[in-house]
Image: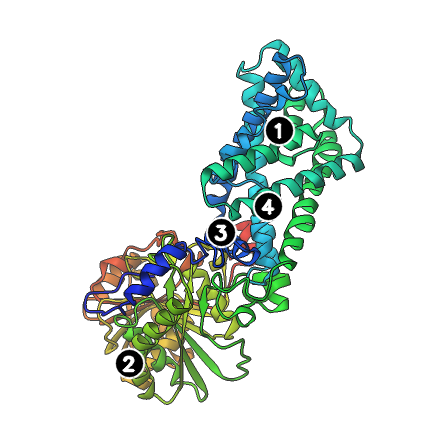
Amino acid sequence: MREPDDGEQPIEPDPEESVREAVERSRSGAPAVGRVVRDRFSTDEVFQRIIAAADEEITSGSRELFFSALAGGFAITITFLLYASLTASTGGDTVLSVMLYPLGFIYIIIGGYQLYTENTLPPVALTLERLASIPAMLRNWLVVLAGNFAGGALGAVALVYGGVFSDEVAATAISLSMKGVETAWWPLFSKAAFAGLIVAGVVWVEYAARDTISRLVVIYLAFLAIPLGGLFHSVVSFTETIYLVLHGELLLTTGMVEFVLPVLLGNTVGGVVLVTIVNYFQTTEHRLESARFEGASRQLSIREWLFGGFVGRSYVPLIDTAEGPVENGDHHRVVVPIANPRTEAHLVELGCVLASEHEKATVHVVHIIQKPDRPVRGYRGSRRRRIIEESESLLEPLHETGADYDVGFETSTVVSHRSFEEIFDIVRRKDGDTVVMGWSEDRLWSAARSDRSLSDLTRRLPSDFLVLKDRGLDTSHVLLPTDGGPNCELSAAVARTLQSISGAEVELLHVVDGPDEREAGEQFLSDWAVEQDLGGATMTVDDSGDVETAIENAAVDATLVIMGATERGLLSRLVADSLHMDVVDDVDCSVLLTERKGGWGLRERIFGRR
C-alpha cells in the first residue's frame, strides 16, 4: 500500500495484536508458525504458504520470470557436470557417482530461481482455487520452461566449447546422455512422472519446513533419488540433448521428440496429478483463510478461469470490493481509477461532468492500492478490514462531488500487485464506456506487475481513455488541436461537453505546411467544426508547419489542451515514456490526452501503420 500523504492519519493497530501478528504471520500474510503445534504446519497452513508464493509468481513480469528461469536452467548444468565428472572418476560407481547430483537443484531452490518442475505446484494450487486462470498458469509455465531450456542450452554450449571436460569425462557425459535417448517412450514417461512427483513433493515439504537446514536435507535426499532410481528430469534431459547435438551424436528433432517430450510430459503429470491435486483435496475449506479473503466470492468465473483475460480477468486481486460484472445496455459508465482519493478529486469531477451529458450514466470510482513487494504486515482478516475502512473513509468525500451531478455514483477498492492491468479488468467487468485517469511523475500505473506486456494491454483498448496531465484543472478556455481522425473526434466530444456543461470557451487549431495551404486548412477546419457540432468555436489555422510550436503558442492563453492520440497510440507511449510530442510537458496548462476504444489489429501489428 502506498505511503500516506502528509496529513493522513493511518489507523493505529492494536499493539497486542501487532506483536502476535508479527510473530505468527509472514509478510505475505501466510502463516509463519503452526496454529496447533508451533513448529509444525497443518496441510491447510502449508497450502496457505504455497498460495502466498504462487501469488508472487503469477504476478511477476515475463522478463523477471524468464531471467530467473534462465539462471535456474544454467544451474542445472552444474548437476550434469558433476554427475559426468564423478561417474568418470569413480569408475561408474552407482552411489558415489551421484553424490553431488543434487547441487544444481539446491542452488535453484534455496536461491529462489525458477524451475519448471518446481512451478508445477504453486501456480496450479492458485489455479485450482480459481484465483488465477488456466491461461495465466500456462503463461507462467511457458515462460519458465523457455528460460530453463535457454539456460540449459547455454550450459551445454559452455561444456562442449569451454574445455571444461577432459576427453574421458566428455565420453562419459555422452554415454550418460545416450541412456535416456535409448530408453523407450513409455518407460521414459513413467520414470519422468515419478521424478515429477519427487520434485513437486519437495516443494510441498519445503513449504512445511521452517529452517534452511531442513530444506537442504529434504532437497538433497529427494534429488539424490532421481539418478539412483534411474529417473529423468526435463531440464537435465534437455541439457543432455543439446550436449549430444553439439557433439554430432544426435539430431535435435529426434532428441526433442523421443527424449525431451516424454520426460516433460511425465514430469508435468507427476507434479500436477500425483502431488498437487492430491494435496489440494486433502485440505479443508479453511485452506484460504489467510492467503485470500472471502473465499469463493472472490474467485474467477468459470469462463474467466478457462479463458483468462480474453473474457474478463485472469487473476483475482488480493482485495476487490466491487460488485460483479454488469451489462450496461444504453447506460453510459465512466470508470475513474485513482491512487489517492485526497488529491485526485478533480478526476472524479471531470468524470461526473462527462457522464452528465448522457441521459443514463454512472460514475464508478475505484481506489486502486498497489500492493508493495514487501508489505509491513500480513493481510489478515483484521488488516483487510482496516484497509477497506480506511479506503472507504477517504472515498466518502467524493460522494458529495457525485451528488452535485445528476448521475449514478459508486465506489470500490482494489488491492493488487498489478494496478495498471486492474484498470483494464475493471473496465471489462463493468462494461465501461470511458476511463478518466491521471498521469504524473510517480507513474503508479506503469510501476505495477502485469501478466501481459503493457504494450499488449494498450494496443486494443476496452473503452475510450482520457488521461489528464494535471496542472490545476480549469476548463474555462479549451484549446483543441486537430487534423481529423477518430481520436480528435473524441477530443471534440469532450470539448463539446465542457462547452455545454461548464460554459467552456473552445478554440480549434489546425496546422498546415505553408501559406499556400492556409485556405484549404481554413475550409477543413470550418467543415470539421460543423461536423463536430462546434461551429461556434474560435478557429485558428497556423501555416508554420511546426505542430508543437503552434500548440505551445496557442496554449499561452488556454487553461486546458485536449489532444487526440497519434496513430501509434497514447497509453503505450505513456507507459514507455515515449510520447513523441514534448508539448505535453512544455505547456503550462493541464493537458487531456484522448484515445478511442479499440486499437491496432493484425494488419497494424504486422505492417506498423493504420
Badge 3: how crowded within 10 Å, few (<14), some, or many (20+)?
some
Give the foreground label among 3 and 1: 3
Tag shown at residue 357:
none
Residue extending furthest toward the front: 37
Q: Disc 2 vs disc 3: Cβ atoms closer than 8 Å?
A: no
Residue identified by numbered label 3: 53
Counting residues from the start of the chain, the first of labels 2 and 4 encountered is: 4
The percent position of residue 183, horizontal first and vertical second, equals 78, 29
Label 3 sits on a secondary structure element that is helix
Give the foreground label among 3 and 4: 3
Q: Disc 4 vs disc 1: Cβ atoms closer than 8 Å?
A: no
Q: Disc 1 vs disc 2: Cβ atoms closer than 8 Å?
A: no
Tag shown at residue 239:
1
Distance (Cα) linking label 4 and label 1:
17 Å
Distance (Cα) linking label 2 and label 3:
37 Å
Residue identified by numbered label 4: 142
The percent position of residue 533, horizontal first and vertical second, equals 39, 82
Counting residues from the start of the chain, the first of labels 1 and 2 encountered is: 1
Above or below for 240 versus 22: above
Q: Is residue 602 visible?
A: no
Counting residues from the start of the chain, the first of labels 3 and 4 encountered is: 3
Distance (Cα) linking label 3 and label 1:
28 Å
- Amino acid residing under circle 3: Ala
Label 1 sits on a secondary structure element that is helix
